[in-house]
Image (cartoon, rainbow, N blue to C red):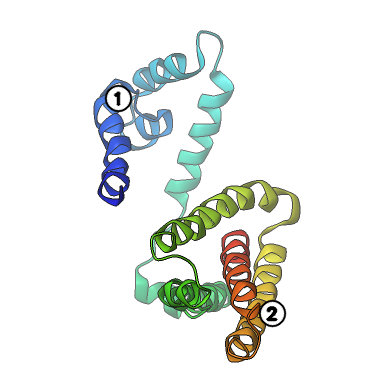
Amino acid sequence: LWPWLLASSGLSALVQLVTLPFFPDSPSYLLIQKGNEEACRKAIRKLWGEGDHQAEIDDIMKEKAAMTSTKTLRVLEVIKERSLRWQLYILMTVMTTLQLCGINAIYFYSFEVFHTAKFEEYLIPYVSLGVGLCECLSSILCSTLIDRFGRKVLLWGGYTLMCSVLALLTMTLSLQHQYFWMHYFSVILIFLFVIFYGIGP
């Protein structure tokens, strides 16, 4: 079954390969990059139907004017620019914490935790698949929550809950030889960690 599951990802690539040539180019690309207003209008009509789309074209023209007035900075210039210093610090902090948050360790050791929890050998790959599915579903949930609560709340909340889950997971793994039910609690915590990772960071 696993080779079929792995090959199934190629199905979406095949669908895109076949259908993408029939899709129109992006109106903003046609107007901003190519400077072809007629092709832009044609693409808008194909995407949104017939009608007066002058307001959309005006918005794209404003975007083009804003882009031409904005200076493109090189990497070294971005690092040296004082006005961008805080944004750069925030970006570096977010990316560093994302790499060091523990998700890779969870994925790496989850098989061993499931094995210790006395799951049947043939069931463990499906439980691991469930962990990946949890991350996928929580990422979809995040896209609906981010408009309501904002990125900052989700980041702080996600990292706080992930730290709490990791602390509890450390405790349950330490006590798993004393209490038989600790194995199952560890499995639940792994799923919770992945869910909080998908919703937050």
Position of residue 48 relative to residue 75, above or below, is above
Amino acid at dot 1: Thr
The x and y percentages for residue 43 are 40, 20
Amino acid at dot 2: Ser
Question: Which residue is drawn at the image coordinates 34% and 30% (left, top)?
Answer: 35
How far separated are the C-alphas under marks 1 and 2? 46 Å
Residue 194 falls in image quadrant: bottom right
* Residue marked by disc 1: 19
Question: Which residue is drawn at the image coordinates 58% and 89% (left, top)?
Answer: 177
Q: Nearer the viewer, residue 36 or 183?
A: 183
* Residue marked by disc 2: 164
Find numbered disc 1 in the image and state the secondary structure of the residue it sits on: helix
Q: Is residue 7 left or right of residue 129?
A: left
The x and y percentages for residue 114 are 49, 71
Q: Is residue 146 left or right of residue 42?
A: right
The x and y percentages for residue 42 are 39, 15
Q: Is residue 4 left or right of residue 49?
A: left
Closer to the camera: disc 1 or disc 2? 2
Which quadrant: the C terminus?
bottom right
Position of residue 120 relative to residue 92, above or below, is above
The x and y percentages for residue 69 are 46, 50
